[in-house]
Amino acid sequence: MASSATDLTPRAREIVDAARELLEAEGPEGLSMRRVAERIGIRAPSIYKHLPDKQALEAALVSAGFEDWAGAFERTDGSPAALARAYRGYALAHPHLYRLMTERPLDRERLVPGVEERAAAPIAGAVGGDPDLARALWAFAHGMTILELNGRFPAGADVDAAWAAGMARIIGE
Amino acid sequence: MASSATDLTPRAREIVDAARELLEAEGPEGLSMRRVAERIGIRAPSIYKHLPDKQALEAALVSAGFEDWAGAFERTDGSPAALARAYRGYALAHPHLYRLMTERPLDRERLVPGVEERAAAPIAGAVGGDPDLARALWAFAHGMTILELNGRFPAGADVDAAWAAGMARIIGE
DNA sequence: GTCTATACCCGGATAGAC
DNA sequence: GTCTATCCGGGTATAGAC
């Protein structure tokens, strides 16, 4: 899985890719500078020749995630149902990255410019541009997604039906 | 702030109360056995005479949180708008505890029995008992809440208006 | 650009004296 | 039920040799 097309050097990109694999495989606890370095056959201190610190590494991960996510939206037909499927599908396929992307304030200066907007635009489009309704829709989608990722729906819950019920009411039939 | 009425000994309750204060004040990173002990004037190893391990301490915090939360719901008039205010208000008043309560699977064996149901019942009631719609409403409320706590709405966003827009569509006018 | 060595933090938990 | 001493693990990051 290639990382984002930014101004990273090839070696830095290799580090970010390794970090991403590690994050997906083991979650945030596995994402240490030592383990990332180990994965590409170097020692942790060498990473600092390519990236200033761990925050920069995480920002690169978040940027790459937004680019992928926007891409997933752009490959749909743009209908609310398709966007909802893409949203949930991306998060279920990359749960730890999705958490990293949503569980803290965005470090916008370090993101690839425009990528947040690319990811948000389809949601705004689905509700015709009303910003309050777009935020409500996003909150619903994020809530469904993160509660599912966090194992908070009971075993017998019909998550598809809950998605459908919410989408029908927020978007209208 | 007193902790829950469980089978905790008085000393254990003191520990849990200290942990809660520490969590609220400093977030999860501040919640170490050493710091909790320090707050009540003992050393960390002494905690293990009262609670088996850190997981038990966290479960006690979550139980107490659910009890408070259910109580906040029960003090409303039960209308959807009042429940929404209580939900958001509780989370904004206790952000770190709210996160602890929602960001991982519930350790139900260690919770005070029935407290999860007490907290969930008002939400189910607000939608007339339809479980799919109740989950959609919960997802919306949690999504609004956690995105606000995580600083993910832009500075100019009208969060009240987004709540109102979502509630109107999910509950109906 | 890599390494070793290291400085400096932090954490959970246990053993055994009192 | 408290303590001290300790064991174990972890982490980010820097200095300086090569």
Image (spheres, coloured by chain):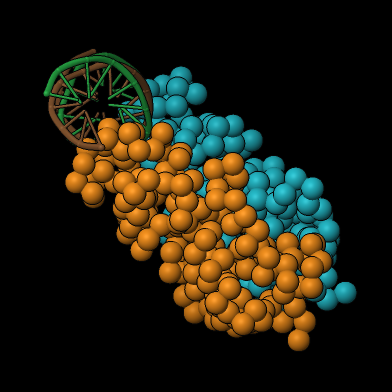
Chain colours: A cyan, B orange, C green, D brown
Residue shown at 62%/62% (left/top)?
A: B118
Query: Which sits in the foreground, A116 or B133?
Result: B133
- From the top left corner, tell me how far across and down residue A172 is, in percent: 83, 76
Question: Relative to A142, is B125 above or below?
Answer: below
Relative to residue A85, is residue A120 depicted above or below?
below
User: Quarter holding the C terminus of chain A?
Assistant: bottom right
Q: In the picture, which quadrant includes the N terminus of chain A?
A: top right
Foreground of the two, C3 or B101: B101
Residue at figure coordinates x 65%, y 79% from the top left: B78
- Say which residue appears at 49% left-offset and 64% top-offset: B68
Is B155 located above or below residue C2 in the figure? below
Q: Give residue B151's position: percent from left, percent from top.
A: 47, 65
Query: Image check: A35 left or right of A65?
Result: left
Task: From the viewer's side, name the closer residue of A33 and A146.
Answer: A146
Q: How many marks?
A: 0
**Residue A124 in the image, given as x and y percentages of width and height:** 69, 72
In percent of the image, x 67 and y 70: which residue is there? B122
In the figure, is residue A150 to the left or right of A45? right
**Image location (x, y in percent) of residue A97:** 58, 45
Quick one: B117 or A110, which is closer to the camera? B117
